[in-house]
Each structure stands twice: as C-alpha cells, then as structure tokens.
Image (spheres, grey):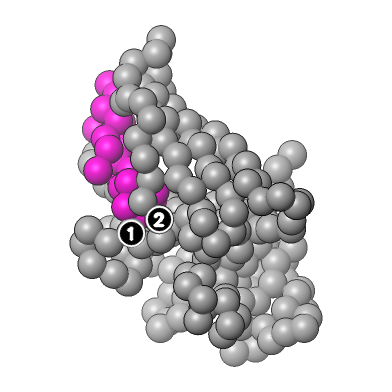
Amino acid sequence: MITLRGELAHLSIDLAGGGIVDFHLLSNGINPLKWEGEGGELEPRNRGHFLCLDRVGRPSAAEQANGMPFHGEAGSSMWKLLGGPERRGDAVVVEMSTHLPLAGMHVRRIVKLEGAHFSVREEVTNTNALGRIYNIVQHPTIGPPFLDESTLVDANARKGFMLSSPMPNPEEPSVYWPRALNAGIPVDMRRLVDAQEPAVGGHWLDGG
C-alpha cells in the first residue's frame, strides 16, 4: 500500500491491482471509495477507484478461458513503484507502472496530491507489433458511510446505456443522466436506493 500524505488530505493506492482505495480529508476522515472486489486481501483485484483496460465488462467465454479477467488486466495486475511518494513543490507525487501481457500494453501513472484534491495522469503504450482498438475506463466505486439515502451524487454525464442490455445493440434503449432503467422502471442515478443491483447503467462524462 502506498500512501500520499498532504496537509489537508491523504490518498492510498494498492499496488495489488492499482486501485485508489482511500481518499479522505483530514478534517472528517470519511473515505468514499469503500468497495472491495472479489479476491484475497493480498491478491490483485478491482478496488475503490480502478482502471479498466483494455476493456470494460465481461470477457467472452473464449477470452476468459485464456486468462482475460473482468474489466481487463489492469485491476488484476501488480503495479510497480517507480518513484515517491515525494514532495514536488506544493504537491506530493508518486509514479508507478504495470504491464498487461495479454493486451500487449504498458501503463505509466503519475498521481499528484495537492491540497484537498488529487490528479492522475496515465500514459498507455501499445507494445504489440500492430495497432489495435481498446477500451479505457476510469471506474470509481463509492459506498457507505459516505453514500447513504441522504447523499446526492451528481455528474456532468450525458447519454448512457444499460449494463444489462443484450448484444448486439447494448446502447439501446438510450438513457440520459440522471435517468436509467432498472427492469424497465425509470430510476434516479443520483441517489442510493434499497436495491440488490443498484448499478444499473453507465453514462459518458462530458470531457469539455
């Protein structure tokens, strides 16, 4: 576990999977990123805010049989510490990397904690002989005690799709933030509800 300690906030990253597993302000200590994927405590797995690469979602049966994990290899790989944590000006900085052998990709990540916020820069290099198509998704997962029935989570999201929608057209029917469909019933994605499967949809964020 790598921890960046600033004057206003702390940030922790698990090298077993590369997930950002703790970010809290020293003034209240509440960590929103309280989610654990399947696997042992020391086993690389998806946790907190993690990287999906070279895909998001479930692999095909053939890909899974050949070792491709859910959401790709980034969250199931060990990450290597390249430098830090160290102070650079007003920020605390750490650098790390990982290699995805099945995808043929290398990831280099720089994380900066400054004041009460942090930034992440990731550089992806294709190590294959030929170019290829891939997916890359930042996958934050938040939970209690930060998230409860009184918490309103908003975002600059736009058009979305249902994770339960079948192929070959999973983007139909389309939904628009903050609306989604759960068993055909409209739901408000901004609030936690008493449901066994609350994560019913995915939305694109506006990068502008």
Visible residue check, residue 56: yes
* Residue 203 quadrant: bottom right
Residue receiving disc 1: 44
Magenta extent:
1-27
Q: Is residue 163 above or below residue 118?
A: below
In the rendered structure, which amino acid carries the disc numbered 1?
A: Pro
Q: Amino acid at mark 2?
A: Ser
Residue 96 occupies quadrant:
top left
Q: Quadrant of the C terminus?
A: top right
Circle 1 — which element?
Answer: loop
State the separation of the CA atoms marked 2 and 1: 6 Å
Q: Is residue 131 left or right of residue 106?
A: right
Q: Nearer the viewer, residue 180 or 10?
A: 10
Question: In the image, what residue occupies the spot 55% across and 45% down?
Answer: 106
Instruction: Give 41 or 27, whichever is nearer the viewer.
Output: 41
Q: What is the residue that sits farthest to the front in this orientation?
A: 129
Which residue is more in the foreground, 118 or 134?
134
Identify the residue at image location x=43%, y=75%: 193
Residue at screen point 32% across, 19% down:
86
| Residue at screen point 35% across, 67% down | 37
Disc 2 target residue: 77
For label 2, count other residues whose C-alpha is less than 10 Å away and answer few (under 14), some (14-19) or many (20+): many
Q: Earlier in the sequence, mark 2 or mark 1?
A: 1
Q: Residues within 10 Å of mark 1 (few under 14, many from 20)?
A: many
The answer to whether residue 135 is magenta is no
Q: Position of residue 143 (x, y in %)?
A: 35, 61
